[in-house]
Image: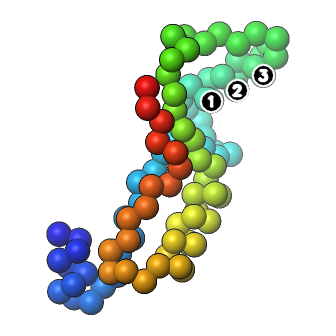
């Protein structure tokens, strides 16, 4: 639908697929919980996992920079990007 709309009305589009985004205002989730634990006791970190989980993260400013660069450097009607590495379990 996006491709048809861009062709029909002369628009250009960018579609982004994001990994988990982190930044200074991040206030929930397991990374934030780890931070709070380590702040209380830097010698101990309790992790509830099997050690086989994988997850990718991207810092917010890097995400914004990547989006702006993609928009500046592409000329196709429809541009699709994965931002960050997609981890598999």
**Residues at marks 1 and 3, CA–CA distance in whole angstroms:** 11 Å
Q: Could you tell me residue 29's position as x and y percent?
A: 53, 29
Q: Residue at x 70, y 13 (%)?
A: 45
Disc assigned to residue 39: 3
Q: Residue at x 68, y 45 (%)?
A: 24
Q: Could you tell me residue 88's position as x and y percent?
A: 44, 32
Q: Could you tell whether 74 is left or right of 63 in the image?
A: left
In the depicted structure, whether residue 85 falls above or below residue 48: below
Along the line of sight, the residue nearer the viewer: 27 or 78: 78
Contact, mark 2 vs mark 3 (Cβ under 8 Å): yes
Label 1: how many Cα within 10 Å (few below 14, some 14–19, many 20+): few
Q: Quadrant of the N terminus?
A: bottom left
Q: Quadrant of residue 8?
A: bottom left
In the depicted structure, whether residue 39 falls above or below residue 70: above
Q: Secondary structure at mark 1?
A: helix
In the depicted structure, whether residue 32 falls above or below residue 11: above
Q: Secondary structure at mark 2?
A: helix
**Residues at marks 1 and 2, CA–CA distance in whole angstroms:** 5 Å
Disc assigned to residue 32: 1
Q: Could you tell whether 30 is left or right of 40 in the image?
A: left
Q: Residue at x 53, y 49 (%)?
A: 84
In the depicted structure, whether residue 89 falls above or below residue 74: above
Label 2: how many Cα within 10 Å (few below 14, some 14–19, many 20+): few
Q: Residue at x 53, y 66 (%)?
A: 67
Contact, mark 1 vs mark 2 (Cβ under 8 Å): yes
């Amino acid at each position: 639908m996006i491709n048809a709309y861009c062709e029909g009305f002369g628009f250009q589009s960018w579609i982004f697929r994001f990994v988990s985004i982190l930044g200074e205002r991040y206030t929930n989730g397991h990374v934030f919980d780890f931070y709070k634990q380590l702040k209380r006791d830097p010698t101990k970190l309790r992790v509830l996992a099997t050690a086989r989980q994988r997850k990718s993260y991207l810092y917010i400013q890097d995400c914004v920079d990547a989006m702006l660069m993609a928009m500046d450097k592409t000329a196709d009607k429809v541009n699709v990007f994965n931002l960050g590495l997609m981890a598999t379990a």
